[in-house]
Each structure stands twice: as structure tokens, then as C-alpha cells.
Amino acid sequence: MMTTQPNFLVILADDLGFSDIGAFGSEISTPHLDELAYAGLRFTDFHTASACSPTRAMLLSGTDHHLAGLGTFAEILTPAHAGKPGYEGYLNDQVAALPEILQDAGYHTIMSGKWHLGLTPERSPHARGFDQSFALLPGAANHYGFEADISPDQTPRLLKGTRGLYAEDGEYVKALPDDYYSSDYFTDRLLGYLADIPEGKPFFAYLPFSAPHWPLQAPDELIAKYAHRYHSGPDALRLERLARLKDLGLIDANVEAHPVIATNAEWAALTDDQKAFSARTMAVYAAMVERMDWNIGRVIEQLKANDQFDNTVILFLSDNGAEGALLEALPAFGPNLQQVIDTHYDNSLANLGRGNSYIWYGPRWAQAGTAPARLYKAFTTEGGIRVPALLHYGKLARQNTISHDFATVMDIAPTVLELAGVQHPAPRFRDREVLPVRGRSLLPWLQARSEHTHPQDHVTGWELFGRKAIRQGDWKAVFIPEPAGPSRWQLYDLSQDPGEIHDQAEARPDILSGLLNAWQQYVRETGVLEDIPAPSLL
């Protein structure tokens, strides 16, 4: 047990790709994250769920999202899933949330940012252990607080779920300030909470940004900085990123990158106007990432000014791989998305990135950020579940280095609890039965008391939208339904093939058989509903 309880700052980016910050190979300016990364520990094999709310459930519970209530997205919960255990659509009461546990252990718990784990006051951050909180409750919203005047019958289904809904300490917020911008305001509120922490009390701070999630929006001056950076297109950027990842030692020099998978036109086939529009979307994305980094710098500056930096464990990660969906093609948005945008938003070239624009950047730019991995967000391939992650805490043995050891977002809660010297309360907490964690504390490894983060026979499973994966050691079996996959189990040796290119299912049926047995065990343990068709999100 530590002699002095540390503070914790967990920072979560939304849909950030593996190579989207400088210390992970990016051309985007992220000096504050880079400083933390180079002085701390960079993970190259850190995994989340393949989409946002399931990852957030895993982070705060330490267990699988099918057990914690987010077996699928609440926004697309089908009648067949509704009412089934683990598919409640919010962080359920079967888990003890990390802030609840720390709150009972004497920590001051604060949060500012995207929640996505329940929309009602009784499911808000305040109800799940945060002493102070400002939260965007749904999965996304306009970053400037702009709301187009769209009648309910015209609003595409999933777009309804991205209208701004905010809560402060369990009460709905009626209005945002005129100068609202999500990353700035989330940080402002967290800084205010940090200033109010009672004297001598340790804190747990959670800063989950909604950047760089669509709609892509950022300050004009930052967009201008990247205005001419991306005119060579996504394929050129992908090659640049891969070269830097190799130079930094984050991937092997001989790694084979998975070919780009996309249904939209290649760069060479676009008109000049289409190229200008596409390059602008990536420029806005880059500006969002830089602005997020600037705000992280503000938090670090305050921690240092208050002599709290050295005793604060700082963890930064993305909630899944980069978002590569063509939103106009998603069934969950409905066929009239483009018509609604054309009618109610100004997507002229010069206006892209402002509050009254509505854009995303698509699969080719996303795969510049997930390379060398296969695909992107919402897929259980490495492009959807392997994320940039860094840990900074000078009192740990493993710092100023790169880790290629496997870890998952479920490991965060048990690691934080062990660092704090707090026991997980299972099987009972606050007069209810709660589940134990499935994650593993990384502290023995961080303190160099163990050689690896997990034993080689450790098994981890993933499932979302009918896309599945199971991993043991370096072997991983993946099931991706058509049209993005072959609708059968594939097998990859990630130690030799991190891009998931060379299917070993026929060559190593023994390995595949063992993994499929492990998959069935995972299904039994977590309650995955395999027999119910996946929702038509993608």
C-alpha cells in the first residue's frame, strides 16, 4: 500500500485514432500530451471496446460492458435486447462504479465531460459517485451548443440522440454560455472543481472530452493552421504516420499494414472541389485534437501550480479507434440525413468546422489514424479496439519507456484501487450485490514486481453489433459479418501479423478450436446475446 494516497486524473478522448497525437506518430501539435508521454509510459497494445459507451462502462466498472449494462448502444436498443440483463442501456446497479468506491474511501470525486452512461438524473454521474460533475449525457452533441431547428419527424433517428442534454450534479442544465465550446468548457468546469477540493483530501478527476467526435468543429484560427496540410490526401498521410510510428519504435520496422477498406472514392478519383472539402474535414479534425491538448495543458499547469502534479497519476487514452463511418450510409441515421444537413446547416467550404456546419471525415482519413491495423471504430479488429494510451506517475518504476504488453480498459479500475490502497467491495456494496472486476491490476507490473501485465494464457473477449473477437496471448480469432468481413471466424498471430492480414484459420485449426472454446466460455460468463440479430447501426 502507498504511504500517501495519490490523486488520479483520467482523461478520455472520443474517437481518437492510434497515431493522432505527436508522441504516437502524428503531425498534429500536441505538446502537452507529448510531454506526459515521453516522460511516462506509452502503451502500444492497449485495448478498449469498439465503441464509446461500452468502453466507458468498462473503464468505470472494471468489468465487461455486457455485464455493466451496455451490451449494445442505448440509442439503437432493439425490442429483442430490451429488458435483457446487461442490455439496460445505462451503467447498471450490478457494478460498483469506481467513483462510488473511491467516494466511500474518502476521495473527492469530480467529473466534467461526456458521460454516455444514462440520460436521467438517477443515472447521471452525480448518482454514480461524483461529488461534483458537469456532464454531456448522450453520446455526442454540437461542440458549440448550436441546435438546428429541425422538426422531430424530420430528424434522423440517431441524430435525435445527439441533441445536447447536459446535467450538473444531477440536475438538467437549461442553457449553455454563449461562448461555449465543448473542450474549453469541460476544462473550465474541471479546473473550478479542482480549485474547490477540500484541504488534504485526495481526488479522483475524470475528464472525458467529446472531441474529436463528429460533428467536426473547432476554432477558426486553429483550422487555418492546418488548412494546407492535408491536400495530398489520406493515403499520403497514412504512409507518413506509418514511417513515424516505426521511427518512434511503436511498431516494428517490418510491419505489414492492412490495406485500406472503404466504399467511398479514392483520392485520385475526386474532383478538385471534393479534395478541398475532404482535406478541410481533416484540418478541422486536427484542430480539434490540438485544442483538446491545449486544454489538457491548462489542467497540468494548475496541478503544478498547486503542487499536486507529482502526486497525481495521469492516464490518457481514447475510447475506441478512429471513427471511419460514412454517416450518410448508416441505417440508424435514416435515408434523409444528407437532406437534413443540406437544409439546416452551412457546409460551404469556408464555413466547415463552425457551429452551424455538420461534417465527418470518413473511412480513408480514419485508417490513416488506425494504421497498421485493420478497419476502425465499431469493429472488433485491431483498428477498432487498439488505442493510444499513456500513463504518467513519477513514483512508478516503469516510466520514460514504451510498453508492448497487452492491457485493457478493464484494468484501469483495479489499478487505481490498488494504487489508492482501496479494496474492491464485491460481493456487496451499498446494500446491493455487485460483480467483481474482470480486469487485472497493473500495479505489480508498473512497479516492476512482475514481468508482464497479464499471463500468457489470459483470455479477453469482445462483441458489439454482432462483431466478435477472442484473444489469448498473441493469438486472436475475429468474426466480422458481411459486407466488411467474411462472416466466419478468422485467426491471426498478432506477434507476426498485427495488421490482421494473413488468416491462419485453416493452417492452425487447433489454435482456432481452442479460441472458440474460450469464446463460448466468454459468452457464458458475460451474457452476450449471440442468438439475437445485431442492430442495423452500420
Image (cartoon, helix red, strand yellow):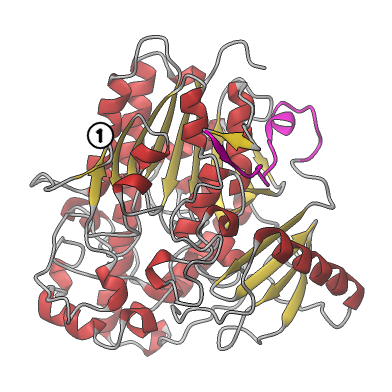
State which quadrant residue 414 falls in: top right
In the displayed structure image, the side of residue 403 where residue 329 appears, left or right:
left
Nearer the observer, 289 or 215: 215
Badge 1 local density, few (<14 within 10 Å), some, or many (20+)? many
> In the picture shown, does residue 454 fall above or below 190?
below
Nearer the observer, 448 or 399: 448
In which quadrant of the rendered image does the C terminus lie? Answer: bottom left
Residue at horizontal 68%, vertical 36%? 441
> In the picture shown, does residue 194 fall above or below 468?
above
> In the picture shown, does residue 281 fall above or below 61?
below
Question: How many numbered callouts?
Answer: 1
Q: Badge 1 is on which residue?
A: 189
Q: Is residue 439 magenta?
A: yes
Q: Position of residue 440 (x, y in %)?
A: 70, 41
> In the picture shown, does residue 288 fall above or below 338?
above
Q: Amino acid at mark 1?
A: Arg
Q: Secondary structure at mark 1?
A: helix
Nearer the observer, 80 or 219: 80
In the displayed structure image, the side of residue 281 where residue 178 appears, left or right:
left
**Magenta residues?**
431-452
